[in-house]
Amino acid sequence: MGTDFFVLNKFSSLKRANGGNMSAYDHKKIEEYWQKYWEANDTFRTEDNSKKEKFYGLVEFPYPSGVGLHVGHVRAYTSLEVIARKRRLEGFNVLFPIGWDAFGLPTENYAIKTGRHPREVTDENIAVFTDQLKRIGYSFDWSKEIDTTDPKYYKWTQWIFLQLFKHGLAFRDRTYVNFCNGCKVVLANEDFRDGKCDRCGSEVVQMEKDVWFLKIRNYAERLLDGLDEVDYLPRIRLEQENWIGKSVGAEVEFAIAGHDKVLRVFTTRPDTLFGATFMVIAPEHPLIQELAEEITNMNELVDYQDKAKRKTEFERVQLAKDKTGVRIQGVQAINPVTHTEIPIFLADYVMMGYGTGAIMAVPGHDNRDWEFAKKFDLPIIEVIKGGDVTEAAYTNTDSGEMVNSGFLNCLEVKDAIKKTIEYLEKENLGKKTINYKMKDWAFNRQRYWGEPIPIIHCPKCGMVPVPENELPLELPIVESYEPTDNGKSPLANIPEWYETTCPVCGGPAERETDTMPQWAGSSWYFLRYFDNENDEAFASEEKMKYWLPVDWYNGGMEHVTRHLLYSRFWHQFLYDIGCVPTREPYAKRTAQGLILGNDGDKMSKSKGNVVNPNEIIDAFGADTLRTYILFIGDYEKSAPWSDNGAKGCRRFLDRVWKLQDMVSEEEGYGKVLETAIHKTIKKVNNDYEEMKYNTAIAALMTLLNDFNKEGIITKAGLKTFILLLYPVAPHITSEIWQNMKMGGTLDEAAWPQYDESKTVDNVIEMAVQINGKVRGTITLPVDADTETAREIALNQENILAYTQGKNIVKEIYVPGKIFNIVVK
RNA sequence: GCGGAUGUGGCGGAAUUGGCAGACGCGCUAGACUUAGGAUCUAGUAUCUUACGAUGUGGGGGUUCAAGUCCCUUCAUCCGCACCA
């Protein structure tokens, strides 16, 4: 190659300076060295009592399953890992912790299958995960590690539960629960679909049981309001709002004819009250029992109830088009404004779990009611002008004029709603009401491997909390903890454990044998990291004041409704009782996209498309894994894995390694690449902050190509390049830093700064358009005026060919952007 | 059904306020070096065309000197919620 002698000469003098020929990039040796170095030097230990500004970066702590770390974890963690490393170089005191959300079914099921104790299995899994995370070179402060299954940790999970209980936010209720025949456990509505358990696929049946609930509904409004003071991705905020599902309307009481009972309904459209020609109640509605004496077709109703109970969610949705229902004979309701008697139906298109479990049907303006009315030949009345209710329900009713509606006639919809509510409140027939789709949080599992609920059932005193000084209430170490068939927890088989005395009256009593759901431990874990040894409180006030809120929380989209709402609920509650200093736990929340298999499908064992991070680390190194996982695509979107893509990133790092052989002794960045380097600092800096890791790495690749084109790099140029790449690939950059004697260790260096004025080229190439089409390019000073640009442009043959013999009608010259000449 | 998002080469994906579409990487093609190449380096790589040039960001229409970007309309895919009253 025709490289000039000067460069080769520099190169050979450098070889001597480095004590020999630069060897090939040996990722194994380098990564092992630096991981040991970081551990031995406590490099990433968070400072106590620091005067520095703090940065608290949080990633969702993993459930340590037996299959080990997944590349999805790597994508989730590497993002904030980059931010954490960058923040340290920027001078922050960084808390970037990790822990284990280790209670849960898979471990317990595995333990039962293999005849081992869940504790043992959990510890083993944690060891595997720890080893894998360390091999990736994450800068976690391992001294802050937490484990939700450690009694020292769940002592405080139980403590928080007791505070909820004492404030009336934890209660027991007898309801139908979804019992999974396979897992032998009660499931939340969200834990199964189409009548099949999400986890094991077994059939889910209804079972009546006493279960614990947390009153998260009390916080529905607060959970919505709080979204205004935090910075969540729009789609995350939206999902939370949808999940909470607020709707404003009214409760209306319908009298039962000839009876002093009333039927209460919730409606968002009280204005349509004059159009309510029948009523529908959910199959489980208690009214049936209350009016049993008057009802003349009880057998038919009971029959329908049974059928409805057996219907799976799937069937209910599938058959949605074909409305079913039964008229309740012998009982009529009275429309409170028309005073006419209207029939009541039992139908499963009305859900007991929402509103009052009963509706007033307005067939003229609701599709479901219209279908039902047609099927049962019920009157359909138009109350809002605009459609033809004999043909279809008219539902375009956000505005419109009221008709057939007595005192509401001629009013606009908005005013009619207001007036109806006024009327109802005056007549004591109803009131303005807000409803939420979100249900209270079913807070229990009938399994062994979870936090015991610290409540004692006393025949005399009722439910009594375990005294706080007796916490933690530890799980007993037992031989058998297999689930029972009757829906009771395995703890109910251990009299030595559940038999106790009442802390109030001293009489014989029994412990609650249910355990907490897996969501419990993760609802407050971020409060524990920075004070994980504290035995007096879940965390000290002083440390909370310094560290809260979490500055940046990244995790999966699958956790943005339940986990995020549950933990915000606990935090808001703790704020209310004066235990935490901030109203919201997380200042900012982002989410990564899925990593798919190389076939574009979701990774799964059965498809055989799972990528094991260990294999990538062995073959290419942790730095390659980290670089590729960030380079793979838009961070928020899903992207398919590609082995070749990973290989490409390894090639990039190989070329980075070779930069060491190209260093010149010129001071500064050198004239040719100065602008390029300043531009790159700016871009990489901004892109990291916006989680645009793919384009940040692309910019570094581009700069590397520039270096190679020059065949030379100044020491300052290399230094900046290494610093920019460090958060992504810390091992190779640390090694180069040390090799090149750049001063101290890279972990303690300062993040590079750019000079805005040097990010702009003085002389640029500009496209010249004729009638909007590019016909050539000109080189000119960035701040040249129109005259200069025209002169240069018209000197070009190409341009001249298009302008000659024509009139220049218009010139659009945007300095630094474009020069467009319109000719005729 | 409701709500949200996304459609750009063979593939993953880039493109501040409208300003040279396809950065960067993969793959592919050719060449160099080599005992060898599934290593490395160099050059090329949207489509059509011999070329000049024309076409091109899901489809159709519009605004503009100029549209991936703005407006209207339509289609497709993905995600969330789902008989929510």
Image (spheres, grey):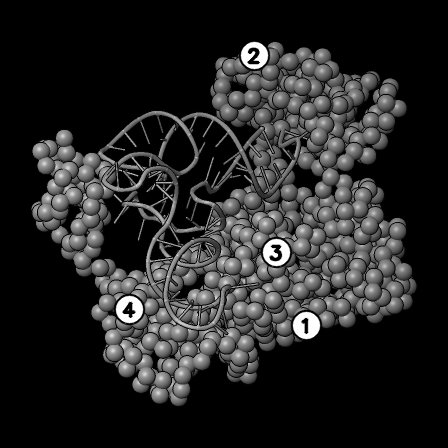
Q: Mark 3 = which residue?
A: A567
- Name the secondary structure under disc 4: helix
Residue A269: x and y in percent read 58, 26
Q: Earlier in the sequence, mark 2 or mark 1?
A: 1
Local crowd size for mark 3, using a 10 Å CA cut-off: few (<14), some (14–19), many (≥20): many
Q: Mark 1 or mark 3, which is nearer to you? A: 1
Circle 2 or circle 4, nearest the eye: 4
Q: Name the amino acid type tagged 3.
A: Ser
Q: Residue at x 65, y 27 (%)?
A: A252
Please, what is the three-letter code of the amino acid marked with disc 4? Glu
> Mark 2 falls on what kind of element?
loop
For the residues labelled 2 and 4, the Cα–Cα distance comes to 76 Å
State how far apart marks 3 and 4 are (Cα): 54 Å
Element carrying mark 3: helix
- Locate residue A345: give its quadrant: top right
Residue A697 lies, in percent from the top left, at 42, 61
Q: Label 2, label 3: how many angstroms apart (C-alpha)?
A: 49 Å
Point out the tag, 2 or 4, that comes first from the N-terminus: 2
Q: Residues within 10 Å of mark 1 (few under 14, many from 20)?
A: some
**In the foreground, A100 or A12:** A12
Residues A303 and A271: in front is: A303
Q: Is residue A775 left or right of residue A464?
A: left
Sooner in the amino-acid sequence: mark 1 or mark 3: 1
Q: In which image quadrant can residue A676 be found?
A: bottom left
| The one of A765 and A1 positioned closer to us in this rendering | A1
Q: Earlier in the sequence, mark 2 or mark 3?
A: 2
Q: Nearer the viewer, mark 2 or mark 3?
A: 2
Q: Which residue is mark 1?
A: A127
Residue A710 disc label: 4
